[in-house]
Amino acid sequence: MSDLQVVQIAAEYPITPKEHGVEFLMDNRHLWLRSSRQWAVQRVRSTAMRAMREWLDTHGCMEVSTPILTPAAAEGTTTLFPVEYFEQQAYLAQTGQLYNEANIFAFKGVYCFGPTFRAEKSKTRRHLTEFWMIEPEMAYCDLDQLLEIEEQFVSHVVQTCLKDRAVELKYLGRELNKLANIMPPFPRIRYDEAIERIKQLQSETADLEQKELLNIEWGDDFGSPHETALTQQFDRPVFVVGYPTAVKAFYMEPWPGRPEVCKSADLLAPEGYGEIIGGSERMSDPNLLIQRIQEHGLPMEPYQWYVDLRKYGSVPHSGFGLGVERTVSWICGLEHIREVSPFPRLINRLYP
RNA sequence: UCCGCAGUAGCUCAAUCGGCAGAGCAAUCGGCUGUUAACCGAUGGGUUCUAGGUUCGAGUCCUAGCUGCGGAGCCA
């Protein structure tokens, strides 16, 4: 050091080297962000986001922005934030997927990357009401090809963080060897098989509470305890393929010869971090699409343009959405997703 | 919405069976000091989340509510 100049005499700093409670730290998020842990997490987040764009930009996808103010929901209307839009009702977007399905017919491979909003009253370590999602969508891509893209994409993101942010990850106490494992291929198990595995685990456990939590029948969607139990069997993310049509969104292609199952795949992160990707091959038949929209009790008018996509020249296509905060939370080995967002929005948290 | 836990000084917490509400850190003042979460002494600091109730007496027990935390459901 050769020179010292006082820029400002700071007031008493609220955050001391002592332990603090969650509520206090969150109230002081604007200052908490300066501390080493938070600094490290944001650096990893930034690198992860860069790596996501990097991989897609060099693998046939271009970034296209999709709207945040939208007239209708993609997946039901219960979890949307309504906003006044002059004389109309609008909603904050919870996905850009439907718009990306329009984009691929102009650009072949696209992705959107931005905040999404879900008014779910979830109070868990895996949920935010505002989170960032990257959603690639590819023409001439079936489910098998989609899974290959996903495993390469996720591996690239993890390996880039490991290479460029080793100092930060070490500071966070992350076990780097667990991240080094994250390379393709990822195991693929069918939904039917996953149910069998969970039932097996349920019969093996002596813990009565756990036994109760693992209760499941074919046709049920997985809860968090199921995902955690299932992923503990693997050292890398695992694909669960072919969910029941009834528990998934309306736009997924039926499984050939098995209409009760759809060509969907979720990617579950290891170590209990849960679902980081939801993806599927999209439905191609316009008549079946109309039928599904009606079955889901959705109004027809807002989806007219979406049905049009199948009428005026369509090809097999697939896409997925990856939750940035969940992924970074897993990479950093954090206990709670709220530290991944610089200014997290939670069910009871809108400040600062 | 449901289940569980918690709410005491600016922060983190203690208070035995229901019996005078305390400590550390921070602050203020003084001292000491090549420190790096410094040290020594002194001082100030409280609607014990709110509203009721039980009791001679409630931080402590009961009822309702509020807020937060953890989890479930829902989802990325």
Image (cartoon, helix red, strand yellow):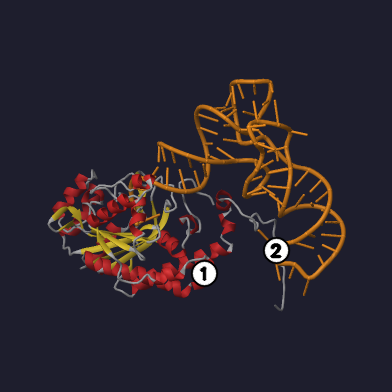
Q: Amino acid at mark 2?
A: Gln
Q: Is residue A148 visible?
A: yes
**Spot occupied by residue A315 in the image (x, y as percentages of width and height):** 17, 65
Q: Horizontally, is A251 left or right of B17 in the view?
A: left
Give the residue at x 36% y 51%: A225
Q: Which residue is mark 1?
A: A170
View extreme (bottom): residue: A2
What's the mark number on residue A78?
none
Of A63 and A328, nearer the camera is: A328
Residue A47, located in which quarter of the rendered image? bottom left
Residue A101, located in which quarter of the rendered image? bottom left
**Spot occupied by residue A221 in the image (x, y as percentages of width and height):** 28, 49
> Alpha-carbon neighbours of circle 1 within 10 Å: few (<14), some, or many (≥20)?
some
**Spot occupied by residue A312 in the image (x, y as percentages of width and height):** 16, 61
> Relative to residue A209, is residue A337 depicted above or below?
below
Whole-Å distance between the Cαs marked 1 and 2? 33 Å
The residue marked by circle 1 belongs to what chain? Answer: A
Q: Is residue A85 visible?
A: no
The residue marked by circle 2 belongs to what chain? Answer: A
| Residues at marks 1 and 2 touching, judged by CB atoms closer than 8 Å | no
Give the residue at x 37% y 61%: A269
**Spot occupied by residue A84 in the image (x, y as percentages of width and height):** 39, 45
Q: Quick one: SS at disc 2?
A: loop
What's the mark number on residue A8?
2
Q: Are marks 1 and 2 on the same chain?
A: yes
> Relative to residue B51, is residue A84 depicted above or below?
below
Q: Horizontally, is A81 left or right of A38 in the view?
A: left
Give the residue at x 17% y 59%: A284
